Image (tube, rainbow, N blue to C red):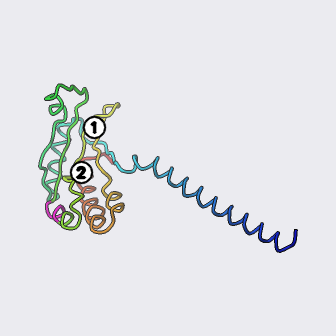
Amino acid sequence: MSEDNNKQVLSKSNWLYMAGSFLAGIMFAGVLVWLLMPSMMLTTHYSKYDSIDETCEKLKEAIEQEGWSCPAIRDMNKSMEKYGVHHDGQVRIVELCKAEYADDILNTNPEVSTLMPCAWGVYKDKQGRVCITGMNMGLMGKMFGGNIARIMGGSVAAEEHRMLAKIAKN
């Protein structure tokens, strides 16, 4: 084999190796994101308070102190019992909304209305701790980009952080 043919074979094998490595890297990153996304999409905080009802009331106060509204605190157990379903653990949904932010987002992205109002789930975990779980608004906003990133990833995430700081254990 001539020296030129050896260089061509070497060049092709280098290119194939690089392309294969690149594709393997992309596949590895994709699998990693797929596995980590669920734990990144939700954030859980432990309440300073021992009861679900007291935690919900304190959340409502913190929401309103921050200039938001709390349209509802939903008792999921009562809602399910209407349909003959009994759930052992108590679960509440605390809704929160800031109309100005909602309007701003809906003007540019009405499809995001499915995420409105914002909400936190309040329940006890297996260790008996009162938990507050919600969507990671900072990450959600960044994923959408644009106006949603500015509002959800910026203002909403910051204000939710301040609300939860009053209720959650450090």
**Residue named by callout 1:** 130
- Where does the image place residue 40, in percent across and percent down from the top left? 39, 50
Distance of mark 1 from mark 2, alpha carbons? Answer: 15 Å
> Pointer 1: residues within 10 angstroms few (<14), some, or many (20+)?
many
Q: Amino acid at mark 1?
A: Val
Q: Secondary structure at mark 1?
A: strand
- Where does the image place residue 130, in percent across and percent down from the top left? 27, 37
Predominant secondary structure in magenta? helix
* Residue drawn at the location 22% of the way across and 35% of the way down: 91
Q: Which residues are magenta?
A: 99-103
- Where does the image place residue 39, in percent across and percent down from the top left? 40, 46
- Mark earlier in primary sequence (1, 2): 1
**Residue named by callout 2:** 166
Q: Quadrant of residue 53?
A: top left
Q: Using the image, determine if residue 170 lies above or below residue 76.
A: below
- Nearest the camera: 25 or 149? 25
